[in-house]
Image (cartoon, rainbow, N blue to C red):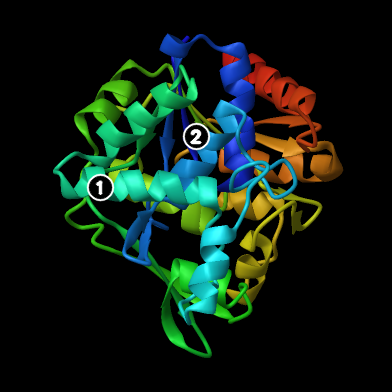
Amino acid sequence: MNIVALAGGVGGAKLADGLAQLLPPEALTIIVNTGDDFEHLGLTISPDVDTVCYTLAGLANPETGWGRADETFEALENVRALGGPDWFRLGDKDLATHLERTRRLKAGQTLTQITRDFCQAWGVRHTILPMSDDPVQTMVDTVEFGELPFQEYFVRRKCEPKVKGFRFAGIESARPTPEVREALERADAIVICPSNPWVSIDPILAVLQLRSTVHCPPSIIAVSPIIGGQTVKGPAAKMYAEMGITPSALAIAEHYKNLLTGFILDTTDAHLAKDVQPVNVQTCVTNSLMKSQTDRRRLAQDVLNFIQTL
């Protein structure tokens, strides 16, 4: 069984890691959001791609889920001392990733090529693909400040502005890479990881055009990132509420309406399973909270078992 996982952020990276524990490299491809990529200190930063890569490599900070474990911040502290911007936390190990990525991009290599080489260097055997080599920038429309680049909203302003909507600048000209197209053609199922639907998954769906294509895999399932009306990490629940939608697992199922064949929600939200049924989606109720490596593997096994039943 060939699986394509769509991921972004810490929750998506955790489930991708669980799937990688169970599936051989040739049976799993992870397509990652690049809508939150941006330039900082003259460097090209790919936060979601790096989070997924670091997680599968066993290099991620176990406390935050992003960045590198056992990180130091000597370079950033000296940037601050010189009057430079320090709002985006770049550790010294992480900085090396961005330096080398930027050098290679300027030399004409693609983000896909660079990500492949980085994974090889870090010992990641499964395929991790950026959703596109074309630039896409997620813009957050806020009440207080109008449109903000995602990292400005997410990191610098700590998700405090009230959200009105989203726009993906450059999406009209962004195309899936040949590697992404090949992975989709081979896929028996697509797993939408428990990532923020608005800013992690929607950019991927827009590039892949899954909502409009006829040639989708037979099974597309999503795992809810909202448990008991709250997100484990990130602003997805806040975003839903600010746009007048009650944050819930049901809201996630509605978000992916007409795309899914299956939906996984936490045991906390078992009472919502019957409400998902009218959306013509089969449901699976399980413990979806991932606090440990064992949890990641257990949820990934539940996902694979569920796919077999569809």
Q: Amino acid at mark 1?
A: Arg
> Residue 167 at what x, y percent from top left?
36, 68
Work out which residue is located at the far bottom of the displayed protein and give it. Answer: 144
Front in this rendered view, residue 178 or 78: 78
Front in this rendered view, residue 114 or 85: 85
Identify the image quadrant of residue 294.
Answer: top right
> Residue 159 at what x, y percent from top left?
61, 73
Q: Residue at x 59, y 34 (%)?
A: 55
Mark pair 2, 1: CA separation:
19 Å
Q: Residue at x 62, y 73 (%)?
A: 158
Image quadrant holding the C terminus, namely: top right
Is 213 on the left-hand or right-hand side of 81? left
> Residue 264 at what x, y percent from top left?
67, 34
User: Does dot 1 land on a helix, a strand or a loop?
Assistant: helix
Q: Residues within 10 Å of mark 2 (few under 14, many from 20)?
A: many
Is 89 on the left-hand or right-hand side of 135? right
| Mark identifier at residue 310 | none
Q: Residues within 10 Å of mark 1 (few under 14, many from 20)?
A: few
Is tag 2's residue or tag 1's residue first in the polypeptide sequence?
2
Decide: is 259 above or below 236. above
Front in this rendered view, residue 288 or 121: 121
Q: Residue at x 74, y 26 (%)?
A: 293
Q: Amino acid at mark 2?
A: Cys
* Residue that mark 1 sits on: 103
Identify the image quadrant of residue 136.
Answer: bottom left
| Mark identifier at residue 53 | 2
